[in-house]
């Protein structure tokens, strides 16, 4: 009986490791989904510090940019 429990535990552990050790969803991914800003919120451009609404801003790597020119400037530097 004890041998069966050890084998069952080893199988369960193997399945857990195959899944990457993630049975439950990450809390961080849920927090990021809930962080969505309303469209009328003003955010600061990471390059030129101008404020623009979220609906008009360009989001790249969790940062906001007022235009494609500012985004390209940031990518170059």
Image: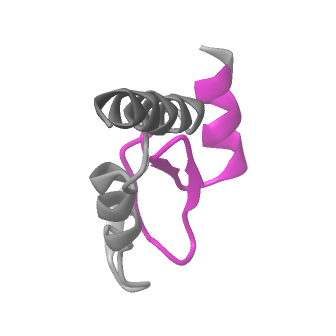
- Tell me residue 14's x, y (percent): 52, 29
Query: Residue 77 placed where, x, y %?
Result: 59, 14
Q: Quadrant of the N terminus?
A: top left
In this rendering, position of residue 52 left or right of residue 66:
left
Q: Residue furthest front?
A: 1
Residue at the spot 55% in from the left edge and 38% down from the top edge = 15
Where in the figure is residue 47, as x and y percent of width and height?
47, 36
Residue closer to the observer: 69 or 31: 31
**Along the viewing direction, whichever of 10 and 1 lies nearer the viewer:** 1
Q: Is residue 56 left or right of residue 40?
A: right
Residue 51 is inside the magenta segment: yes
Q: Say which quarter of the image contains residue 74.
A: top right
Depth check: give the residue in front, 29 or 63: 29
In screen coordinates, is 18 left or right of 17?
right
Res 34 quadrant in image: bottom left
The magenta segment is: 46-75
Q: Is residue 47 visible?
A: no
Decide which of 59, 3 is in the foreground and name it. 3
| Color style of the picture | one colour
Total marks in image: 0
Q: Residue furthest top?
A: 77
Height in image: 41 above or below 62? below
């Amino acid at each position: 009986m004890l041998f069966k429990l050890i084998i069952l535990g080893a199988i369960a552990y193997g399945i857990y490791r195959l899944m990457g050790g993630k049975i439950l969803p990450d809390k961080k991914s849920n927090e990021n989904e809930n962080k969505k800003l309303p469209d009328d919120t003003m955010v600061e451009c990471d390059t030129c510090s101008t404020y623009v609404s979220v609906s008009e801003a360009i989001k790249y790597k969790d940062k906001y940019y007022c235009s494609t020119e500012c985004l390209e400037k940031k990518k170059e530097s």
